[in-house]
Image (cartoon, grey):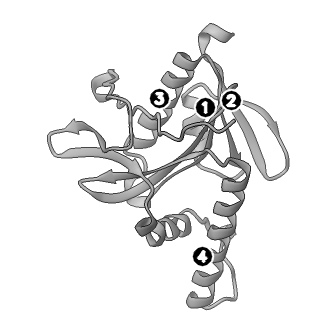
Amino acid sequence: MRRTRSLRLMLLFLPQSRFRPLSSFSGKYMATRTSPSRSIEMRPLEQADQGFMEQLYASTRSADQRMDGCDARTEALLVALQFRARQAQLRTQYPYGDIAVILERDRPIGSLYVNYGPDEIRILDMSLLPEYRNRGIGLGLLRSLQAQGVRMRVPVRIDLLLSSPAYRLLQRCGFVLRGANGLHNSLEWVPPLLT
């Protein structure tokens, strides 16, 4: 049975320790003002975003994931191939996953890839350009997904590279380790009503 694709993300931020909810995403922009000068929006991924998505993926590669001995052009080509292979794998594994581009003042700054299943919300990828990390955007996205988990009465899950710096943020949000496979940690947050 085919499910309708729609990005159901509601972006929440924590200004002055309060959530400020937005209307649900329905294929149009959604925005929030976290300060008079800052607006974060989301929209569905478009074909024209391919170059940005490759750049974003490359920006997430840590020093130990870089290809020593390659010139910059060869490394860029290999990273682009890795990105395309990963996207193809995720689309095969999660054909109804929702991909959104995160924008600040119409400038792409990140992406969020989520699969809404009948028994879980699975975060497939959440990435921000380096200069937009540690500003509360990721925290707001996680809190939003947790709020959706409460409404849907399902856990929120993510598989995270063992070396990922996002591990501490997920722990702060109440995610707990459920297992590891040598490459990834499997983390889960369960709504209080289900525990």
The Cα atoms of the two marked residues, 2 and 3, are separated by 13 Å
Q: CA distance from mark 1 to mark 3?
A: 12 Å
Counting from the top left corner in percent of width and height, residue 13 is at: 35, 31
Vertical position of residue 157 compared to residue 180: above or below: above
Q: Which residue is mark 1?
A: 171
Mark found first going from the N terminus, 2 or 4: 4
Crowding at dot 3, Cα within 10 Å, few <14 / some 14-19 / many 20+, comes out as some
The answer to which quarter of the image holds residue 31 is top left
Residue located at (69% from left, 82% from top): 68
Marks 1 and 4, the one that precedes in the sequence: 4
Query: The disc labelled 3 sits on which kind of residue?
Result: Arg
The alpha-carbon separation of the residues under discs 4 and 3 comes to 31 Å
27 and 35: which is toward the camera: 27
Residue found farthest to the right: 181
Check disc 3 and report its element: helix, strand or loop. Answer: helix
Where on the picture, by quarter, is residue 28?
top left
Q: Secondary structure at mark 1?
A: helix
Q: Residue 117's x, y, as percent? A: 66, 32
Indicate which disc, 4 or 3, sits on the residue closer to the N terminus: 4
Position of the N terminus, as image quadrant, is top right
Q: Mark 1 vs mark 3: give the one in front.
A: 3
| CB under 8 Å between discs 2 and 1 | no
Image quarter in which the C terminus is found:
top right
Label at residue 80: 4
Residue position marked by numbered label 2 in the rendering: 188
- Identify the residue position indicated by label 3 in the image: 143
